[in-house]
């Protein structure tokens, strides 16, 4: 953290490499990994309600409506921190904002474990949402800004991989602690998430600050030092620094009424095209129903014919395992195949598998339903899961990146909140198979959107996206 213009030296060493020798930068990988690991707690806290709701409902006597709101409310609570995250990231730095995120995540976990009423749990979810919102916005911005172009897709995809690791850990926690007394089990599930933020915050402090943030603060020497350690070659470090300086100078010359005004009131043609692509992607990612499966898979499996909590939670763990494994596939394919092909393949697969889930629910076949759900999360995780935040972060111009990512994440969370806070009610209105047929239609529309609107960005520098979107 910076205090009085002095920057604490990062604790992480970088390996010495002979001048002019191209290599895949391990230091950049380590930095992106540490930043992304904060999102483990985001995934854990969001998905833990999937199994915990079964026991909270019984312990505190909550109604279906209360469970629905408690489960999905964090997505709406996040709006305040999501919209403030860009300002915080520009004021405190990317690194300082991630440390603050971990502090809120620890406080929220402790508050949830101690909650004794519906009101107390709602307040605890709000505290947690502040940390989740900061992490959700700032981690992808940091990863995009620290990564060389050759590995930006892989390093940015780490974000979603760690979110899914958190989701998987929450499912395992549900399964492991389900045997405890009802009043104790769900509290232990949440309390288990209180200690990791301490270690993650320490890890974040060991990272260097984003070179783009340093240039925005006029600290060019420090920025060059960071770029030298996170670029594939010394020449690339010099080129990245010059590109950042030019982008910062251009943004300061034309900023006028501020970032929000430039994005929303008087956007240029290029900015408008970028916003349409980013906001559209964020909307379709959540409107296709992924969080309905992540948070309500126990209800889906019970609808398909499973009766015991053990079988239901075991099947949910399988969902988490498959989701995480296919995120790894996407991580390695993102820079090799490109963002656009992965998104097109993913959207088509999501539409087909959601229709399959709906059909198996009509047939009340538990095994076929579980297989269809696993196929759905696999299709989602090879494209729409990790590629959307990567694409959204890299296409935003530097001058708009922090606030633009905040806006995109706000759209994502509002859509997610609408899905998760209405799933039970919607299933009661149009039936659960009807819900999944609806989500399949949305996924088909997402495929058409990607095909018609999105250019390929893989391998391009962050500073030439304006040229790409002017074509």
Image (cartoon, rainbow, N blue to C red):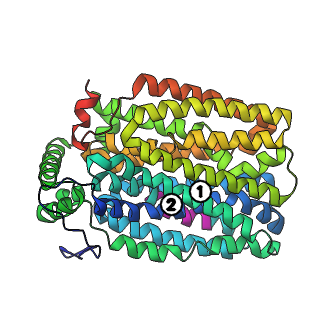
Q: Is residue 234 visible?
A: yes
Q: Which residue is mark 2?
A: 132
Which residue position holds label 1? 74
Tag 2 and tag 1, C-beta contact below 8 Å: yes
Q: Is residue 331 left or right of residue 180?
A: left
The tag on residue 328 is none
What range of the chain is rendered magenta?
124-134
Please tell me how crowded label 1 is: few (under 14), some (14-19), or many (20+) other residues with Cα within 10 Å: many
Residue under the point 77% across and 45% down: 300
Query: Which quarter of the image is occupied by the C terminus?
Result: top left
Front residue of this view, candidates 468 and 131:
468
Taking the spot 48% from the left edge, 56% from the top edge, the residue there is 80
Indicate the position of residue 239 as horizontal and vertical percent values.
Answer: 13, 48
The image position of residue 378, as x and y in percent, is 60, 43
Mark 2 or mark 1: whose residue is earlier in sequence: 1
In 3D space, how far apart are the residues under numbered discs 2 and 1 (Cα atoms)?
Answer: 9 Å
- Element assignment for label 2: helix
Image quadrant holding the N terminus, namely bottom left
Question: Magenta-highlighted stretch: main secondary structure?
Answer: helix
Q: Is residue 133 magenta?
A: yes
Residue at screen point 47% across, 44% down: 330
Task: Please state if 435 lies on the left or on the right of 165 as rendered.
Answer: right
């Amino acid at each position: 953290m910076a205090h009085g213009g002095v920057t604490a030296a990062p604790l992480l060493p970088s390996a010495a490499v002979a001048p002019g020798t191209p290599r895949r930068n391990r230091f950049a990988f380590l930095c992106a990994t540490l930043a992304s690991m904060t999102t483990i707690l985001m995934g854990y806290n969001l998905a833990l309600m999937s199994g915990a709701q079964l026991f909270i409902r019984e312990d505190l006597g909550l109604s279906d409506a209360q469970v629905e709101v408690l489960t999905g409310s964090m997505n709406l609570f996040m709006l305040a921190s999501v919209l403030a995250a860009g300002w915080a990231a520009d004021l405190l730095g990317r690194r300082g904002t991630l440390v603050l995120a971990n502090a809120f995540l620890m406080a929220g976990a402790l508050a949830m474990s101690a909650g004794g009423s519906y009101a107390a749990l709602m307040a605890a979810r709000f505290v947690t949402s502040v940390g989740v919102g900061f992490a959700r916005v700032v981690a992808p911005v940091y990863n995009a800004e620290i990564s060389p172009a050759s590995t930006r897709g892989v390093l940015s995809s780490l974000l979603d991989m760690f979110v899914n690791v958190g989701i998987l850990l929450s499912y395992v926690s549900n399964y492991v602690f389900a045997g405890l007394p009802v009043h104790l089990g769900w509290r232990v599930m949440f309390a288990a998430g209180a200690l990791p933020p301490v270690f993650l915050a320490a890890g974040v402090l060991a990272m260097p600050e984003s070179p783009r943030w340093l240039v925005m603060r006029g600290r060019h020497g420090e920025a060059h030092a960071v770029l030298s350690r996170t670029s594939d070659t010394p020449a690339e470090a010099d080129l990245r620094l010059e590109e950042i300086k030019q982008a910062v100078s251009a943004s300061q010359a034309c900023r006028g009424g501020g970032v929000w005004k430039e994005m929303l009131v008087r956007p240029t043609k290029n900015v408008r095209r970028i916003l349409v692509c980013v906001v559209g992607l964020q909307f379709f990612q959540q409107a296709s129903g992924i969080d309905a499966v992540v948070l309500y898979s126990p209800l889906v499996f019970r609808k398909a014919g499973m009766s015991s909590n053990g079988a239901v939670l075991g099947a949910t763990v399988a969902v988490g395992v498959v989701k995480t494994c296919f995120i790894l596939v996407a991580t390695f394919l993102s820079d090799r195949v490109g963002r656009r092909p992965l998104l097109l393949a993913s959207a088509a697969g999501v539409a087909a598998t959601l229709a399959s889930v709906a059909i198996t629910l009509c047939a009340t076949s538990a095994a076929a339903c579980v297989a269809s759900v696993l196929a759905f999360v696999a299709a989602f995780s090879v494209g729409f899961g990790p590629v959307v935040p990567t694409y959204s972060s890299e296409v935003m111009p530097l001058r708009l990146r922090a606030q633009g990512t905040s806006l995109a994440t706000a759209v994502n969370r509002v859509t997610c909140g609408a899905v998760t806070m209405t799933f039970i009610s919607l299933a009661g209105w149009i039936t659960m198979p009807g819900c999944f047929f609806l989500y399949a239609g949305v996924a088909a529309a997402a495929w058409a959107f990607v095909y018609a609107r999105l250019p390929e960005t893989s391998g391009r520098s962050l500073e030439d996206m304006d040229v790409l979107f002017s074509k």
